[in-house]
Amino acid sequence: MDNILLQNLADMLVDNWEKREGDIKKRLNSLLRKKSNKRVILELSKAIESREVLDKNKAVLVTTLTLIRRNLDCKKEVGELLKKYNMINLLYGGLIKLLNGRSDTFKIQISWNHNTFENKYEFIDRFPVPEHWRFIDLIITVSILIEEKVEKFESVLIKDHTDLLLLNYIHGVENWNISEAFINNLLKDETNALRRSIGFYLLIQPIERLFSTPLETNREKSNFKNKIKSFIRVFENVPLQVQAELLINYFITNKRVKSIPAFLAKQMVKMNLTDCLVLEIKSNKVRTLDDIYILLFIIKSIRIKSQGDKSYKNTLYDALLKKIILFIEENKGIYIWDKNTENLFAEIYKMFPKRFKNRLEKSIVKTSESLMISRLDELVRFNLFINDSNRAKVINGMANTIQSVKSK
Amino acid sequence: MIKLIINRVSYAGEFLITVLHRGIEDEDCSYGRKIIKEKINRNNLIFEQFIVNDDILRDLGQIITIEEGFLTPKDDLNIYSNSVCAKITRYVSGIKPSKVIKTLENRFEFRLPIDIIIQINEFIKKYTGIDINKNPIFYGDTFIYEPIAVDFSENDRNGITIKNLEVNSEVIIKFKRNGLIVHSCKEICVNIAQELEINSNVEWASFDIEVYKNNELLYFNYDISYMKSLHLSMGVVNQPKNVRLNHLSSYFEIPTEPSITESIIGEKRDFIEELYSKSNFEMSRQIQNVQEEGNITFIKPGETSLALKMITNFLNNHYKELWIYDPYFTDKSRFNKTLDWLRIFIELSNHKINIVYYCKDEDKAFNFNSIREALLQDKVLNRTLHNKTLNWTFIETKSPIHDRFIFGEGNDNQFSGLTIGTSLNSVDTNHFCINYINHTSTKSILYELNNYLNEGNIEGQCTI
């Protein structure tokens, strides 16, 4: 076990992350001269004691990664060996070095595509455990820390600036009792929206798991209530604009589920959240009629118990109405008109209070008159004619739906 | 009183173009007023559409002449789509919109910068259909258009069926294939609501159709064809090959060859016919390739007079300013030839000449301090410099610009240029190419080079 061997192993591992080599296991094994895990770690320990290796943290990490990459099932054995030779802290040190991204040759490089997702919660929901098999050796290695030192494990996840470990660990890990401090750390991250949504995911997961189970005993019911209480306690500690962001993210990602958790819906219909919610509604997260429907449904359904000015609901209705008018007038959001769209639009129309209904109708009439669908447009402005003919189908569908709702 | 639909564009309160449509009727559309606005250069560009009476033609202002005629669907001036013919009347205006066009004694010119004009023209094309880029003289004119459509389509008896013709209409069809007219036929529509069928007994690929009513041309279109088959060729490209580099860049991607599949939708072409057609094309292309003139001229030693001729012909155009980029212009070992060039420059009617050069070693080339003295050594130049002031600037750069360029800006702000593969003082001793550069390229290259100079890359300069 010497520096040259360690460097070769490190290069091989990093190359494998960049471009998968089919025979990586064989090659690692031959570099290790087919020695057993026990022997390798023993030799490593001796090399560290005799100060032969330059960087003990990196050495332990590289060795662990190699052993695990060579045999993905030997984590338990390797973990125990590291504990026996007091190398867990060194493993931690090596991971920090790898993940802080400062080395040119020894780091992980990932380009995520979540930049195209404004709704980070949707990204997490749609792509669980991304790049899992590419970095499986690293992911298993990090999990060794869970049994030994949970705080160090959580610290590694936070220090990983690529968020790879976070994204891979949030979907269920054995033996990890997630600390509240960890979740708060994620929720309060000011620059990384992905981490905020990850924090929310971890916060809501334990409760979501209980949705599908029937609560029969009193103990089960009070357990559920306590979980909700502690959720609310953590959640309300978070800045208002983050609250708005996370709630909108959640509801839009889950817009097609059959039922909405009432406690969460109540969190959204709070007066102090109104301005932040309006900003979220204006953003590109709200892109289709489905999105508008779910938000409108929640705002309409939740009754306000507290006294005071109830007109803030109107501010939210106004924001949602403006979004639909944007869809209509700028040809966004609604591109085909079929039975589903018709039903959805009818429900949305019914939910709006009267004066909002009038504004919606006015916008439809105004846009309808501006469409270029006459014979002259067909002859002289054919491109515009084709575009507007398609829009006309949608707009006429909307107008007819409103008529039929009114006549009932 | 006939009703017309007006489409009009105005800019900064002046009418740019007016198009009136006659004979268009809609069941569901009443053509209520439509207005579309756009802001360009702080002024409003407005398109309007509404219904007018034909008495609007009485207040058109000063009209030079009226042109009237018939347009086929393929004519440039026909703004209608859908294979419709048009009757057109053009009222040529004597007064041009002054915010856009300058009216001078012997010509018209643009008052606005060209890129603004192009934006305005795009707007006009988008909403009125008229392409003013091709005919800027149309500014200020009024047009009346009337569409004429004839309902015809391919039938399954190898011919064409025409519907809804008026009584006593005549139809002439010429069926064509491979550049020959293979069948022609003239028929008269006798009964009302008769469907006229004209079929060919021979195979055809396209046809021309003319329809006359009361001996007057009603409709005319030519080279009409219907798609019989589609030949799709698709390629799937694999990941490119990566070449790891040391200096130029970190990686270089070489695209790999695509694997191609072909499929044919519809009728398959006759094998012999396709073979003949393909070979014909390939063989004629070989001949064309040889005969083609390029815009690169290759000069060998001994062809100096050709090189001189090309370069001086270029320099003889009326440029108000010239730029010459030649790093070894002031080389002492060939300075006699440089002096020759400078003698030629004196004779040119140019106003300003900029010469951009490089001096690596003061022993081997003149720098901006010593160049004036060097020029005065020549008798001809000496005499000239005592009689008149030229407007020459010698600009020395801190590092050499390799390629040799000559750029000229004309009095009409049009640019053109040459690239020469060798220095001006070695045109008699080298193998090199001379290449012409067009307006847009010259303008952008000159812009980049001048920016480079202005960013502090000038060692010094001297004006003579």
Image (cartoon, grey):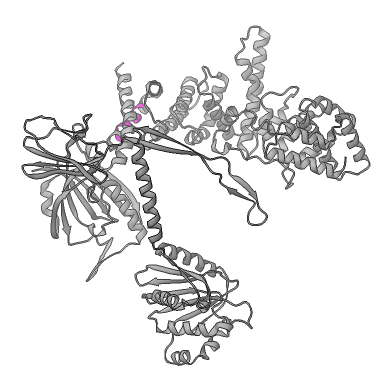
| Figure check: B334 above or below A40 | below
For this rendering, which residue is in front, A313 or A338?
Answer: A338
- Judge whether residue A86 can be spotted in this image: no
Q: Which image quadrant: the N terminus of chain A?
A: top right
Asked if one can make out residue B293 in the rendered structure from this viewpoint, the answer is yes
Relative placement, left or right, of B322 versus B136 is: right
Question: Residue at 55% of width from left, 74% of height from top?
Answer: B327
Residue A299 versus residue B371 in the image, above or below: above
Residue B249 coordinates in the image, percent (x, y):
63, 54
Residue A361 is inside the magenta segment: yes
Which quadrant holds residue B316? bottom left
Q: A173 and A155: which one is in front?
A: A173
Instruction: Point out the image quarter for the C terminus of chain A.
Output: top left
At x 30% / y 28%, what residue is drawn? A396
Query: Which residue is located at x 55 percent, y 35 percent?
Result: A117
Over which residues does the magenta segment extend? Answer: A357-366
Residue B446: image location, x then y, percent? 47, 67
| Residue A327 image position (x, y, % from top left) | 40, 34
Q: So how many labels did they put on this image?
A: 0
Measured from the top left, where is residue B245 in percent x and y? 66, 53
| Res A163 quadrant in image | top right
Q: Can you tell which quarter of the image residue B317 is in?
A: bottom left
Is B445 a magenta residue? no
Q: Residue at 52%, 27% (x, y): give it.
A: A252
Q: Magenta span: helix, strand or loop, mainly?
A: helix
Query: Which residue is situated farthest in the right direction here?
Result: A50
Describe residue B67's horizontal placement relative to residue A239 as left or right: left
The front one of A126 and B44 is A126
